[in-house]
Structure formats: structure tokens, C-alpha cells
Image (cartoon, rainbow, N blue to C red):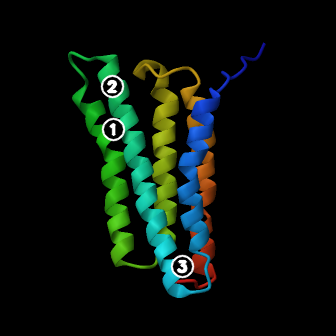
Amino acid sequence: MSVRPPILPRAALRLGFLGLAPLAVSALISLSEHASTARLGAIGFSLYAAVLLSFLGGVRCGFEIMRAPENPNGLRLLFSALPALSGWALAALVVYITPVLGAAAMFAGLFALQAMWDYRSARDAGAPAWYPVLRQVLTGGAMIICMIIPLATALHRF
């Protein structure tokens, strides 16, 4: 008998998709025929991707503090900071180096790594049963959005 996935709370799903909207809009702006507008879209994409990674790292930090409030695991806290640090370092590179084809792939990889960590350790971290499913859905959306940037690069938009 197969186990049904937990039902996602509507508020979490709606807010999650609303949180992806700026990433999608900025990626779509990168398809503009005007090079300066496309570049701004790519920079906006990178900055917002860093914001999302920072948020996800913050969620993980909160889970660790909830799991062991008196003695949180230092290594887990360090790992919860890595998505933010990686995302902001990558965003800084995009601001200074316009071609972001590789950056989009790296952002997709960072989202995937964070989602795998969330999925594998959600129960130990004290996350609700629906959280890993939500992360799979939203990470899939973020990774699809990340594919718009290579398209803009192939079209020579910036």
C-alpha cells in the first residue's frame, strides 16, 4: 500500500509560489531585446536567487534551534549559513561579470542541494510532514525558472 503525500497548507503553497514570482519576472526580463534591460533582469534574477537561498538557510537555522534550543549543532548551523553565503557570492560575481549562463546553473544546483538536505533531514529537523513536499514543488519551479537565463544568453540578450 502506498503512502499518500501530506496535503500542503494552502497558505504555504500560495506564499511559496508568490515568493517565486520575482525570480520568474526577473528571469523573463532577461529575455528583453534591449541589452541593458536584459542585463538588469539577469542581475535582479541573481540578487533574488540569493535572497531565496538566504531565506532557505534561515529556515534551516530555525529548525536547528527548535530541534535543540539549549545546544544546537554547530555544524548544522554552519551548513544553514552556506546557502546564503554561496548565493550572495554568486550574485556579486553576476553584478561584476555579465555572462550569467554558468551562474544560473550554479543557482539551480544550490537550490537542488538545499532541497535534498531539506528532504532528507526534515523529520530530524522538526519540520512539518508537508515541508519536504513543498520544497520539492518550489525547488522544481525555481530550477525551471533558472533555465530561462541560459535561453537569454543563447539569444544574446546581454
Of the numbered discs 3 and 2, the one sitting upstream in the chain is 3
Query: Would you say 131 lies left or right of 155 here?
Result: left
- Taking the spot 56% from the left edge, 30% from the top edge, the residue there is 132
Residue type, mark 2 in image: Glu
Q: Which residue is mark 2?
A: 64
Q: CA distance from mark 2 to mark 1?
A: 9 Å
- Which residue is most to the right? 1
Does dot 2 land on a helix, a strand or a loop? Answer: helix
Q: Is residue 61 above or below residue 1?
A: below
| Residues packed near mark 3 inside 10 Å, few (<14), some (14 to 19) or many (20 plus) | many
The residue at the point 63 percent across, 82 percent down is 155
What residue do we see at 39% from left, 71% from top? 94
Contact between labelled residues 1 and 3, with CB atoms less than 8 Å apart: no
User: Does residue 100 show up?
Assistant: no
Please name the residue that numbered disc 3 is placed on: 38
Q: Residue furthest top?
A: 1
Q: Label 1's element?
A: helix
Residue 61 in percent (x, y) is at 33, 32
Q: Nearer the viewer, mark 3 or mark 2?
A: 3
Give the labeled residue for mark 1. 80
Q: How far from the left and from the top, in percent, is residue 42?
A: 49, 71
Q: Are marks 2 and 1 in contact (CB under 8 Å)?
A: yes
